[in-house]
Image: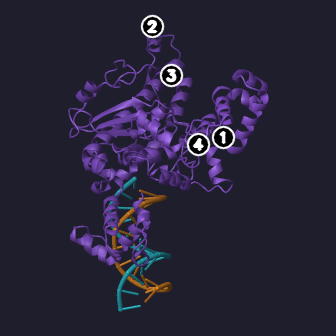
Chain colours: A purple, B cyan, C orange
Amino acid sequence: MLQIQDQSLRPLTTAHLAQTMSLLVLSNLDLQEKVMQELADNPALELIEERVCPICHRPLKKGERCLECSRKNQDEGPIVFLSPRDSMRTPRSTQLEDDLIDLEPAAPENLTLSVLEQLAIDLDPSDHQLASYILSSLDENGFLQDHPILIARATHSSLTQVHAVIDLISHVDPPGLATAGPREALIAQLDQFPQKSPLTKIAKSILEETFAELGRRDFEGIAMRLDTSVSQVRKAIAFIHDNLTPYPAKAFWGSGRQPAAPDPNVYHTPDILISCNPIDPDGPLMVEIFSAISGWLRVNPLFRKAISNNRKEASEEWLKHMERAALFVKCLQQRSNTMRQLMRVLVIEQRKFILHGDRFLKPMTRAYLAKQIKVHESTISRAVAHKSVALPNGRIIPLNRFFDRSLSVRDRIKEIIISEPKAYTDDQIVDILHKENIRIARRTVAKYRAIEGILPARLRHKKSAQVAARV
DNA sequence: CTATGGCACGGATT
DNA sequence: AATCCGTGCCATAG
């Protein structure tokens, strides 16, 4: 018989493979496509667009969540719920494989850094994270394609905050950065010109009101609409042409474009969002898991009914469809169920880490977690791979980081070195750590240093510990 | 001689 | 079965 196997959850053993005739693999990444495909192929499957609570199936209004339901379902502890992913994955973030590090980074790091430096003066420190997130979201032309609302959500910021930061960014050195498109970029650049000559006024009107005509080079039309002469229009356009660039980022990196070096601490739309309880900050954390599809998948009840009505004539094919559809939804349900449990345990165990930073990550293996929620180890492995999670403080990290055995120690080492008067040697660091009950070999300290990009003691002497501090 | 980085091995994890 | 990680040993740079 035909079997459907959700690889991202089910243990996949060779034995399993052998006894499974046909295997439909659902990887995390293209799950959405797979669902769509299945939806197209299988008439028994039905997608309900309307938002429903995944637990009680009660229809929900836009943005509403079934809180009581979530709470009831999980006795106590963190509140975990699924919500539809409002934004479909953009093509570029879908192609990321391996580590999320490969994530589409468009804007080169030097551009990002340069802008951040300029921003440092005006920018409220608390918006720093937001700014770097926005910068990392720019496409290769320097435009911001993601909607501000999405950004606000992903970074725990208010919409006004996001707009304010975008406005700041668009007015520093490569002017027009982080705007929505060429037109907005040009307008932002025009704002840079302090003196408001009649020429710039016309130019602005052209951009704001008759951009389409500009594209068609319809100078007469523009002149008519703006009630000026064609020669004025020509002058203004010449001005735009000479002084402004529709693609702000190009002006910055010119021709010598570097392969992008993305900030490993910034990712795109997270798969999971952890936030503090707005009512009670010390209470349970809230976890929001974004599902691949928006809507609710089920076996079409009409289909089911049709079959039971004329059971005898029901064709073999129909039954197959039914069976397959049922299996399909079951897999997906199981999948989200596992994901919920997984996050629940994770959030309880690593609360300190989530709230107070890297130092408090307690080493935990996927195997341990697997035992806790009684699933196969490989299930966990698959489930946490290729996913990113947004922390309450706005940082977005790969879910796999929860299983980094040495993160807390590395963090401690970083601190020791930064706050140290005069260059510690690796051996001395070992001693310090030893007194804190952290037993690692000298060689290991060296490795960690390397990972964090910290220079050896000799070269470090005074200056450059800031390189690592910036992250 | 000391502090580091390279290679490689064994055990744990996935 | 494949991979990752901490370490020990040894060569080398200072």
Helix, strand or loop at mark 4: loop
Q: Residue furthest top?
A: A309
Callout 3 amino acid: His
Helix, strand or loop at mark 1: loop
For marks 4 and 2, give the one nearer the viewer: 4
Instruction: Name the residue nearer the viewer: A245 or A227.
Output: A227
Q: Earlier in the sequence, mark 3 or mark 4?
A: 4
Q: Kindly report the distance in space between the C-alpha atoms of the residues bearing marks 1 and 2.
A: 64 Å
Chain for mark 2?
A: A
Residue that carries the numbered disc 1 in the rendered image = A246
Left or right of A10? Residue A278 is left
Residue that carries the numbered disc 2 in the rendered image = A309
Helix, strand or loop at mark 3: helix
Q: Earlier in the sequence, mark 3 or mark 2?
A: 2
Chain for mark 3?
A: A
Q: Residue A137 in the image: state x and y as whole percent.
A: 52, 43
Residue that carries the numbered disc 3 in the rendered image = A321
Instruction: Name the residue nearer the viewer: A405 or A200.
Output: A200
Q: Kindly report the distance in space between the C-alpha atoms of the residues bearing marks 1 and 3.
A: 52 Å
Q: Kindly report the distance in space between the C-alpha atoms of the residues bearing marks 1 and 4.
A: 14 Å
Left or right of A199? Residue A327 is left
